[in-house]
Image (cartoon, rainbow, N blue to C red):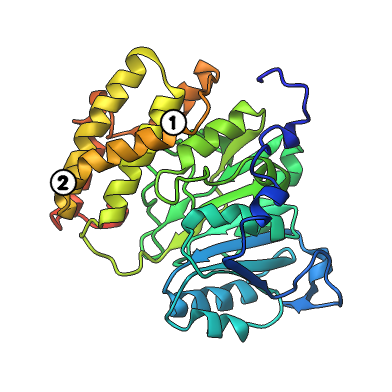
Amino acid sequence: MDGSSQPRQQRHLAGHGPAARLATQNHAGVHGDEGGEPSAARTYHGRTLGDVEISVIVPTHERRDLVAALLTRLRNLPGPAREVIVIDDASTDGTAAMLCEAGPGVRVLRNEVPRRFDALADAVEMARGWLILQLDDDAYPAPETLTRVVEHFRRRGEALGMAALPFLDPATERPMLTSFLPDLPAGADYGPTPGFLAGAVAVRREAALAIPLSPPGYAQYQTEPAALIEYLHAGWEADFLATAPVYHLWAGRTHRISFDSAFLPLRNDIVTIKRYYRGWRRSEMLIGRYLTGFVHLLAAGYPQAWPRALRDAERMLASLPERHVEPSILQRIYPCFAGATLTSLLSPINARRIAWYLGLLPIDQIG
């Protein structure tokens, strides 16, 4: 703990609370059930929204059909009362019109200017569930997942702030992109997590109001390590709940690395590493990340963007206060950077990533 006398849920709010965000939200619109409490009884899969337990937040951009299919799945899932909040991030493909016809239980945060994951904090403020489930627009929970998430948070008590969920290929049931998640002992259904994937995570709304699920300014990609560091530093517990899977369709399966998927992770990792890590650990992480970042940008066809990523990281760091957190937290988070540090460059995960890029290995076998 940092010794502050403020209540835990208020400690991270300075500059990011409701007043600060709403004062700059002229570019966004909200519809569905505007205002705080519902003005009339509305139902979602036979339940009143006044008794919502879990709010499912789905960021999307230009993926109308995927979102429509996801809403149908969520409407038909058994389990606790829920609402769905779709963040329409300046889509121009008819997503907005489709969402206007989505029916009760679906609320929309519309951004006229793209904000990516920086809009998550506003969606959390809108939420009426005491739990938040963040989903990708091309992912969906297993039938029992919502029930198990709610039961797990109730069983673990008020100290639990976050639960990372398995991210699985629906055809093979293999984990995808989550090699950092722990192998649990036989018979255990949960344990401490060193990380999470943004498209498959449940959080207590109280925690998410205080600590954004995506650090402001990160936008997207590799937002998770810094967020989890802050959750743990604030005293929240974070679990991996192995029995509540989320399935990922991996829309448009491709071996192409995009500019954003190479540039943003590099920039964000540099910010996280420089802001939190010290000494030899920081040096070996940065050297590895500089090397892997250049390779990723080269594969994406933008090697000239490597210096820009470093400059952008320094600009972000200049506006962020220095953070000193417990070494045990930083050690716990370290597996999130597997394959990107100097000591893990020749790891099996990098071999699998290269094989995937060359078309020799399916995405669900990367780990």
Identify the image quadrant of residue 75.
bottom right
- Residue nearest the observer in this picture, 43 or 291: 291
Q: Which mark is residue 304?
A: 2
- The amino acid type, in three-letter code, at marker 2 is Gln
Tag 2's secondary structure? helix
Q: Is residue 185 above or below residue 29?
A: above
- Distance from disc 1 to disc 2, alpha carbons, whole Å, reads 23 Å
Q: Which mark is residue 347?
A: none
Q: Is residue 314 above or below residue 207?
A: above
Where residue 54 appears, x then y in whole percent? Answer: 70, 59
Q: Would you say 289 lies left or right of 214 here? A: left
The quadrant of the picture occupied by the N terminus is top right
Residue at 75% in and 71% down: 34
Name the residue that disc number 1 marks: 318
Residue at 24% in and 64% down: 254
Identify the image quadrant of residue 30.
bottom right
Identify the image quadrant of residue 106.
bottom right
- Residue nearest the observer in this picture, 45 or 323: 323
Q: Would you say 20 lies left or right of 223 here? A: right
Where residue 119 appears, x then y in whole percent? Answer: 56, 57
- Residue nearest the observer in this picture, 162 or 323: 323
Callout 2: 10 Å neighbours few (<14), some, many (20+)? few
Q: Would you say 353 lies left or right of 338 here? A: left
Where residue 87 appears, x then y in whole percent? Answer: 56, 66
- The amino acid type, in three-letter code, at marker 1 is Ala
Q: Is residue 294 above or below residue 232?
A: below
Tell me, yes or no, if residue 322 can be seen here.
yes
Tag 1's secondary structure? helix
Q: Would you say 231 lies left or right of 151 here? A: left
Residue at 50% in and 32% down: 320
